Amino acid sequence: MNLGKWKLALAAAGLVAGLALHPGMASADDTKAALRLQAFGGDAQLTSIKHAVARFNEKYPNVTVEIAMDPISQGWGDYVTHILGQFSAHKSYDVYGTAIETFKALTSRHLFIPLDDFIAKNPSFNDFAPNLFKYGSYEGKVYFMPIGWNNIMINYNRKLFKEAGVDLPKAGWTWAEFREIAKKLTKRDAAGNVLQFGYEVPNQNFFVQPWFFSNGTSVLNDDWTHSNMLDPKVSESLQFLHDLIQVDKVSPVPGKDTMDNQFLAGQVAMISRGHWILENVKKAGVDMDIAIPPTKVDDTTVIGFGGYAVSAASKSPDLAKALIAELTSVETQKEEGELGGGVPGRKSAAETPGFLAFPPSAALYYQTLPHTKPVASPANFQEVEKIFIRYYQAMMSDEMTIADGVKRCHEELEASFKRLAEASK
């Protein structure tokens, strides 16, 4: 989940959840302890987490929970670096909320404890999609309890479609149809200056993956151990995106910042995002809906998801698990999903009237789940993401040709995987 993919205004901060209710209540556990939770996201996540902690404190009134939120504004690679720094300084948290992009990088360093027994003792976890446990596993053991997930969809402004007299996207639309629609949705003044872009060609690793997947290819091989950049379909996908920018001029060159604000202001008609954008879309009053990304070979899109893990350095692992149970409860999942966080990992929480109320095609999130592939997340994700994005942006801006870019990117990626293999010997 990129989860770089959540550029949110929330500043990283440590927030202490107060002790709840009546410390002397007869049904409460009298255990005294202090837990620290490192989570990620924005207002929707923080709100649901604070309410979950309050429910946890009803059972454990003498346990304080310190909450630190990270907006992931610098990408998941930097988040991994941040977490590794905490462990190196012996200042690790008890519970970590993180995303699939970080899973191998962290579990390969044995920073967390397995959760298989904990999961087996909680039948209610059967409500989660089985694949979420599969992707949260390492060497046959589950280390991450699923939170929510995001599959990248085409988010589009229905008002702008109607103003341009363009039919709303239909299931099965193709790359060629998408390209023509993006042209029709791009507006220019008399001098040729763009007033409204038809699409934002993505600037982040997670957002751009559907353009490879829908063409039957990927930046890495299937087991994430080598580069796949020399596949001609990778070049074909990059060329398509390049031409949207440089030939059709329906998108600006991907820059450092995402164009969420421009989309919310009606200056961009279509962007590639996940469910997390709904929080700000609702606040801005945008008449938005979602569509499955257009197809070249098939309609596969990318999925990223979050999970909670228990630190191997935690002095209270059982309490940490109890906190995770509340953080992933039906109540928490429903609240976060309806507020506009990720798609709930629990299917029941994604079937509520509140969740399905917006956008109009909200049911597509779960309907497309069987047609998703996880974002490539090798143990050297920090390097892989930075290498790919550096060459991707250079190719999109015409600083180098597609042919030269894929070749040089391939060479750097292979060198990174070689270093990873040597380090693991």
Image: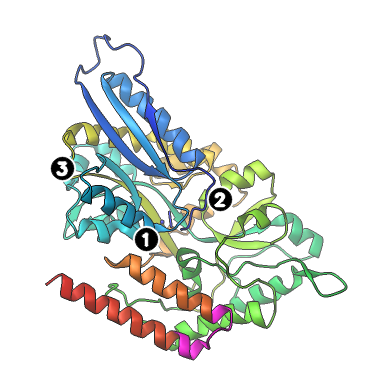
- Per the model, the C-alpha gap separating discs 1 and 3 is 30 Å
Q: Which mark is residue 40?
A: none
- Residue denoted by label 2: 277
Name the outermost residue toward the left.
Answer: 425
Residue 332 sits in quarter? top left
Q: Is residue 280 visible?
A: yes
Helix, strand or loop status at disc 2:
helix
- Tell me which label, 3 or 2, sits earlier in the chain: 3
Q: Which residue is tagged 1?
A: 77
SS for dot 1? helix
Label 2 amino acid?
Ile
| Horizontal and vertical percent position of residue 28 | 25, 16
Q: Is residue 356 above or below residue 223?
A: above
Measuring from the top left, give residue 163's x and y in whole percent.
81, 60
The numbered disc on residue 117 is 3
Q: In the image, which is nearer the foreground, mark 3 or mark 2?
A: 2
Q: Is residue 243 left or right of residue 1?
A: right
Q: Earlier in the sequence, mark 2 or mark 1?
A: 1
Q: Are marks 2 and 1 in contact (CB under 8 Å)?
A: no
Tell me how far mark 2 sits from mark 1, CA to CA: 21 Å
Name the residue at the front extreme.
89
* Distance from Cα at disc 3 to Cα at disc 2: 35 Å
Residue 230 is at least partly visible in this image: no
Please tell me which residue lies in front, 332 or 347: 332
Give residue 165's quadrant in the image: bottom right
> Alpha-carbon neighbours of circle 1 within 10 Å: few (<14), some, or many (≥20)?
many
